Image: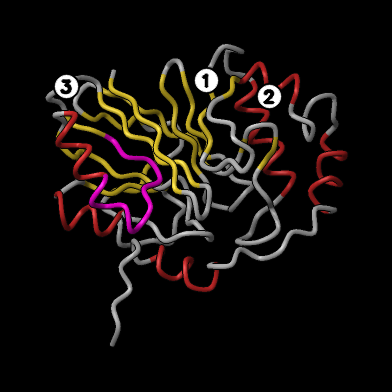
Amino acid sequence: MIFRQLFERETSTYTYLLAARPGGKAVLIDPVHGFEDMYVQLLGQLGVAPGWAIDTHTHADHITALGELRDRTGCQTVMGETSQASCVDRHVRDGEVLDCDGLSLTAWFTPGHTDESFTFLLPDRVFTGDLLLYRGTGRTDFQSGDARKSWRSIQRLFALPDATLVYAGHDYKGWTVSTIGEEKRFNPRLAGRTEDEYVAIMAALNLPRPAQMDVAVPANLACGQVRSP
């Protein structure tokens, strides 16, 4: 399998590129607007064709590249069925398998960070978006986030084998990968906690609003393509 982890520094966002084989079609997960040239260049250098571009949820901290990538490469765009982004080509359901030329990603509805967050799974790894982070969890205080739903979605992930690799949508401390087993044992918001304790932790975070939220959310509901009148 071809696998690349790409990092956007301004918002500490990870984008993932994966394909079953050279010469096949590729998936891009959570691509960031402004990096389309790099994605297209990398696809060419790796010898893979654009297949699917996926957003795990409607991002509030950056603008998505879904629409621009579709225009430039002809790829198909994907989000979960509860997303309000009507511009995407395919809305996947919980448990649906997205096949991309031999690469099969299973979609799980995992609300909590937002009310429309999805996680995408391969047999050995999981792409958690902003739900489960490295030694942390995604905030739950806007976009209909809900700490109890976050807890329950994370417990669903925690039923995966401990060796399952975790690839999150962001990191602010230098982490690049974890495992389900590590997060069960060492995540300070989750390890040894009850659901009520987790809810209290999330309620006390008192985080500032994302700087780009008022621009990013409406832009991302249009697949990142907001045109001037």
7 left or right of 91 in image:
right
Q: Amino acid at mark 2?
A: Glu
Q: Quadrant of residue 106 in the image?
A: top left
Q: The residue tagged with tag 3: helix, strand or loop?
A: loop
What stretch of residues is rendered in magenta?
A: 27-38
The chosen color scheme is secondary structure
Mark before the other along the chain sequence, 3 or 1: 3
Asked if 139 appears above or below 186 in the picture, the reply is below
Mark 2 and mark 3 in contact? Answer it, CB < 8 Å.
no
Give residue 165's mark: 1
Q: The residue tagged with tag 2: helix, strand or loop?
A: helix
Q: Which residue is the site of mark 3? A: 22
Q: The residue tagged with tag 1: helix, strand or loop?
A: strand
Q: Which residue is the site of mark 2? A: 183
Q: What residue is at 26 percent from the left and 52 percent from the top? A: 36
Mark 1 and mark 2 in contact? Answer it, CB < 8 Å.
no
Distance between mark 3 and mark 1 Cα atoms: 22 Å
Distance between mark 1 and mark 2 Cα atoms: 10 Å
Q: Amino acid at mark 1?
A: Leu
Mark before the other along the chain sequence, 2 or 3: 3
